[in-house]
Image (cartoon, helix red, strand yellow):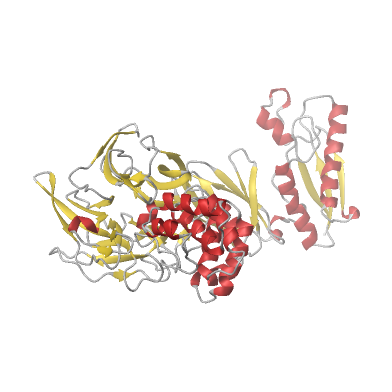
Amino acid sequence: MKKLYIVLSFAIASSVTAQNADTQKADKLYNRYEYVSAAKEYLKLVENGKTSPYVYKQLADTYFNMFDTTEAAKWYAQATQTEQDAETYYRYAQMLKSNGKYEESNKQMQKFAALAPKDQRAITFKQNPNYVPKLLDKHKNFTVKPLEINSDKSDFGAVLYDNQLYFTSARNTARKDYGWNKEPFLDIYKADYNIDGTFTNSATVNELNSKRHDGPVTISADGNTVYFTSDSFREKVFEKDKKNNLQLGKNNLFVCTKENGKWGKIISLPFNSKEYSTSNPSLSRDGKTLYFSSNMPGSIGGVDIWKVAVNADGTYGEPVNLGAKINTEGNESFPFIADDNNTLYYASSGKQGLGGLDVFVADLAKGTEAVNMGQPINGEKDDFGFTFNKDKNIGFFASNRAESDDIYLATPLCGVELIATVTNAKTGAIIPGAKVAILDDKNNVITSKNADEKGQVSYDVECDKAYSLEISSEGFESNTFPVGKTKGGKKEMPVTLQPIESIITETEVVLNPIYFEYNKANITREGAFELDKLVQALKSNPNMVILAKSHTDNRGSDVYNLNLSDKRAKSTVQYVISKGIPAERISGKGMGEIEPKVDCKENCTEEQHAQNRRSEFLIVKK
């Protein structure tokens, strides 16, 4: 149903090439946009052996217009056994992608790109043909779930103002069916948003609805002005198609203001036309700009995102196309401008996505390229109509991932972009290539990266959680940096590493304690991180020779502790040798409990015992 608001309001009829007496009935239904009935008639021709490339393509386009991706792909496969136009290959690629068949989709995109090399969609594809894995790996910023007010018909276009959710639905079975997909005409609905986060009491907004399609809507910040999409038949504006006995209307934009608390006179916007469609309005919070979708002259593709100034005196400026960073030769629709008046969300079939339509976000103030929002907002099917309510911190979008168009609630995951910049503590110079591991609050390594040429590493982490960074680089003392809990947004952390010479004294290499677990001699992860500093010191000083002394706490017998400390000394030496240091440059000696760091005797605490279980690194030769 959403395709009414994407593809020129009405489908573009296929070429008349190869029409004949056999296809006459099916073609007439197709040209009347009665796709359900048209598909049945074309299928009869196939069953009776009256097939041709034309019939296959008509069947494929029919299912494409109904967004039956499986059937459309099936018949495009048949149609493309003979040479087709570029757009047919593009549609076939879209349908394959919507079924998760990305490799097969890429093959069709290659054919499309060969036939339309100057098309921006082709150029973008050739520049980055294997973009899907990157989109799938994107950090997930939302959790999503379907709304309880969805029906078994099309529901989309949800936008929350105060505690009222306005949306568009075909659920009114008392209405006449629309031939496109045999669903009732669309109406504007609203539902209550309750304090517990549920939505109830769905009802039609009768003052705005007409006999044909109505919705979606956008409402001004003060709640007194509504813009909405409706059929041009509301104004008795249409074209007559005598051949197919049709009256062809367009989607148009209308405005209405409240009078005594009720919606008053409905007025057609001055840039509407019977020559093109205007639909899917979104009014900026300052009320100065109206965004919408249209295929009016000047569009780059089928349907583009446009904007128009709303003047203080109630007049309107000239519509302005948002340009090639937003629009493509495909279709762009369902714009939503956020409360900051700069962040634009919209749906595109022409930019690189995971399915037929994907949701993108763009910063209009910066003028940068639009960014795919990734999963779980986007998936293999059509995803569109994203809106966001800043006060409630929730968003909405529509998707046909469960077959029919349904509305989904999108709840942001609180996230922090952590950016660490690693520099030399003495000189301030950046340290590119430094290894930066991020650990959780239990000191488990989550993952690690190498700093880029600017000495930077970025991680997406959760809000209200503590982390730490372990950073190491050749020639520098490794170090650990705590990352405190953050409420969200971006956290920049300048971190410095001391040159390795800073831990070398006249008599020893000073490390943080190499603690051992009780009654064990194995090197722990934390211990290995410290011993790597010793490895760096030995590499930087090729003549240095080290004696590693290992100590135990005073629990256990003297003999047992001496043996245990000897094992720990050997483990320490073996670790350093495993890192490429010659065996003759390091030796180990177990000291047992005879040289405690904390002489607590029989009343040692666990912390004191841990301090006594240690290793020391004496310089035998410099």
Q: Using the rendered image of the protein, determine whether residue 412 is visible from the camera's viewpoint.
A: no
Q: Position of residue 329 (x, y in %)?
A: 44, 69
Q: Residue furthest top?
A: 602
- Residue at coordinates 87% horizontally, 37% vertically from top-left? 566
Q: Position of residue 236 (x, y in %)?
A: 19, 59
State the residue in front, 62 or 512.
62
Q: Is residue 514 above or below residue 582?
A: above
Q: Residue furthest left?
A: 260
Q: Position of residue 163 (x, y in %)?
A: 26, 39
Quarter assignment of residue 421: bottom right
Q: Using the rendered image of the protein, determine whether residue 33 is visible from the camera's viewpoint.
A: yes
Q: Residue furthest right?
A: 584
Number of marks in the image? Answer: 0
Q: Position of residue 180 (x, y in %)?
A: 38, 51
- Quadrant containing the C terminus is bottom right
State the residue in front, 172 or 450.
172
Q: Residue furthest front?
A: 21
Position of 507 compared to 188: left or right? right
- Residue at coordinates 73% horizontally, 39% vertically from top-left? 515
State the residue in front, 333 or 179.
179
- Residue at coordinates 75% horizontally, 36% vertically from top-left? 516
Position of 422 compared to 359: left or right? right
Q: Is residue 269 above or below residue 526?
A: below
Q: Is residue 237 above or below residue 113?
A: above
